[in-house]
């Protein structure tokens, strides 16, 4: 719909329309600049007339449906109302956008390459843009900078449609659907909810990957900005009674990959790997304990997450960026919890030397169960033996676990168990300081990595590990970027919503 023009007087109620206010010579836009009000007044009247026509048609159609005696009448009325509302909204959106294009055509424009060169208007070119309400055709000016040898459409940048035929709102809806469910299901979902035809499921996939790549770039910018802030030195001691703890809980989970992504990578039992590891961190704070149970309590809404396929060294850089963004470097006591993987403790030692390191208690219990199962052939009934090992673990006496195994005299009784038993025992003795659970609990610390394991499930498993799914890193990483922002309640940095002008 082209922007209407020719009307000079204000329509009734124009001074109350959102986004516009009266000026001495007409209407003022953002920043107080004078704009051509005549076209807007005529457009508003045309949209109001269309709305009245649509409303009358909708009421009559709804009445006929109600008296038809058919089933599913309410949904039919809802769909009719949705189409009417979309038609009205689409007329307003198309009209205002093309009015803005007309205003742009008469305004001075400089090169967007940063050179400040004056550019010339080459032509007005049409562009079909698919929106949440339906398609619109935008007639906008296309400019060329002779010095920079580049052309551009300024209105595309203002509307956020440079390089795409989808509006920002529809792009966001597609990306959220694609990040949440299989692309085919997401396609059906968008079609059912909006009534729009996206042409194919590949559209949903392309938009999701594009928005996810943009999410990675935005996250990197925020992390870089946090790292660039000057350090303020060690944190002051917290007030009496304020625990002021911050946690970094780290883990990794495998995502199913296509063979091309795992070539040359060994998996378990010497076979070719079928997954690639996604490293994930959950950062949150704790300010106190539960008054009834004395258990640690995570501060509500304090969790944020990072995820990446990148190596541990790069992951550590992202982790430090998020750590500083959250202001955790100002908290006196950081705590790192992990499952015992070497890369976790390397990061902890190199990047967070002052942090308290804790091996997830439940992983430690799993290793105890594995050790007991390994030794069952010579133990017979291993119930008492396992109970004693659990007691040693709870008290942080890893040396006693080693002594209990040594007392079994494996070299003589079961030589084939010596090597695997030594590996399991080494897990406990090598993490002795990280397994002082009695002290950790006395200090009110978390000793489990449940928050990050939940994130592994929410961010990765629920989307990437469904039946028959196999990915490339290039295809999955953008999806995980969006899901990570969602889980952290930070999608606003990817899709900021401008404040309405009043």
Image (tube, rainbow, N blue to C red):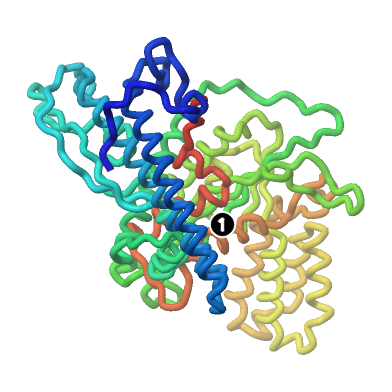
Q: Quadrant of the N terminus?
A: top left
Residue that carries the numbered disc 1 in the rendered image = 251
User: Which residue is more in the foreground, 421 or 154?
Assistant: 154
Q: Secondary structure at mark 1?
A: strand
Q: Residue furthest right?
A: 292
Residue 63 screen position, x and y as percent: 54, 65
Task: Return the x and y of residue 470 as percentages of the image width and height.
Answer: 38, 71
Residue 212 visible in the picture: no
Q: Residue at x 49, y 23 (%)?
A: 15
Name the residue nearer the viewer: 20 or 348: 20
Q: Is residue 249 left or right of residue 190?
A: right
Q: Of 240 and 353, which appears nearest the observer? A: 240
Vertical side of 267 occupied by 288: above or below: above
Q: Quadrant of residue 286?
A: top right
Neighbours of disc 1 within 10 Å: few (<14), some (14-19), many (20+): many
Give the residue drawn at x 36%, y 74%: 272
Instruction: Please give left or right for residue 32 compared with residue 350 in the image.
Output: left
- Up the image or down, 48 lies above or below 390; here it is above
Left or right of 157 in this view: 30: right
Residue 306 percent coordinates (x, y):
52, 48
Number of marks in the rendered image: 1
Residue 100 placement: quadrant: top left
Residue at figure coordinates x 85%, y 49% from the top left: 290
Residue 493 appears at what percent x and percent y?
A: 48, 38
């Amino acid at each position: 719909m082209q922007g209407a023009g020719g009307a000079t007087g204000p329509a009734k109620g124009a001074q109350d329309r959102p986004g516009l206010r009266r000026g001495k010579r007409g209407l003022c836009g953002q920043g107080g600049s004078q704009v051509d009000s005549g076209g807007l007044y005529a457009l508003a009247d045309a949209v109001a007339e269309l709305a009245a026509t649509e409303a009358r048609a909708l009421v009559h159609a709804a009445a006929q449906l109600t008296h038809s005696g058919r089933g599913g009448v309410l949904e039919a009325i809802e769909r009719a109302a949705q189409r009417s509302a979309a038609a009205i909204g689409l007329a307003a959106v198309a009209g205002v956008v093309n009015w803005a294009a007309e205003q742009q055509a008469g305004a001075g424009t400089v090169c967007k390459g940063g050179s400040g060169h004056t550019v010339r208007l080459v032509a007005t070119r049409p562009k079909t843009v698919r929106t949440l309400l339906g398609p619109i055709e935008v007639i906008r000016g296309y400019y060329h900078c002779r010095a920079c040898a580049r052309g551009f459409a300024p209105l595309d940048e203002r509307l956020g449609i440079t390089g795409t035929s989808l509006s920002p709102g529809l792009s966001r809806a597609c990306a959220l659907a694609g990040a949440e469910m299989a692309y085919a299901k997401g396609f059906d979902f968008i079609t059912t909810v909006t009534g729009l035809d996206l042409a194919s499921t590949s559209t949903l996939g392309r938009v999701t990957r594009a928005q996810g790549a943009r999410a990675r770039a935005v996250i990197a910018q925020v992390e870089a900005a946090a790292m660039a802030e000057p350090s303020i030195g060690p944190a002051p001691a917290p007030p009496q009674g304020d625990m002021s703890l911050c946690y970094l809980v780290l883990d990794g989970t495998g995502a199913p990959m296509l063979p091309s992504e795992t070539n040359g990578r060994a998996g378990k039992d010497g076979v070719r790997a079928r997954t690639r590891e996604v490293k994930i961190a959950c950062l949150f704070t704790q300010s106190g304990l539960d008054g009834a149970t004395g258990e640690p309590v995570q501060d509500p809404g304090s969790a944020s997450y990072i995820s990446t396929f990148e190596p541990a060294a790069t992951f550590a850089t992202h982790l430090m960026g998020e750590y500083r963004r959250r202001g955790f470097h100002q908290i006196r006591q950081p705590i790192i919890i992990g499952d015992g993987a070497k890369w976790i403790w390397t990061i902890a030692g190199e990047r967070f030397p002052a942090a308290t390191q804790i091996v997830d208690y439940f992983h430690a219990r799993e290793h105890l169960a594995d050790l007991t199962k390994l030794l069952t052939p010579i133990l017979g009934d291993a119930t008492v033996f396992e109970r004693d090992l659990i007691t040693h673990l709870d008290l942080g006496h890893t040396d006693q676990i080693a002594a209990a195994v040594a007392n079994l005299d494996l070299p003589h009784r079961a030589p084939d168990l010596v090597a695997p038993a030594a590996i399991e025992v080494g897990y406990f003795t090598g993490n002795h300081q990280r397994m002082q659970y009695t002290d950790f609990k006395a200090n009110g610390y978390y000793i489990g990595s449940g928050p990050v394991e939940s994130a592994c499930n929410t961010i990765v498993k629920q989307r990437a590990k469904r039946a028959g799914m196999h990915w490339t890193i290039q295809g999955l990483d953008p999806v995980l970027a969006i899901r990570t922002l969602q889980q952290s309640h930070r999608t606003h940095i990817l899709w900021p919503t401008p404040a309405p002008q009043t």
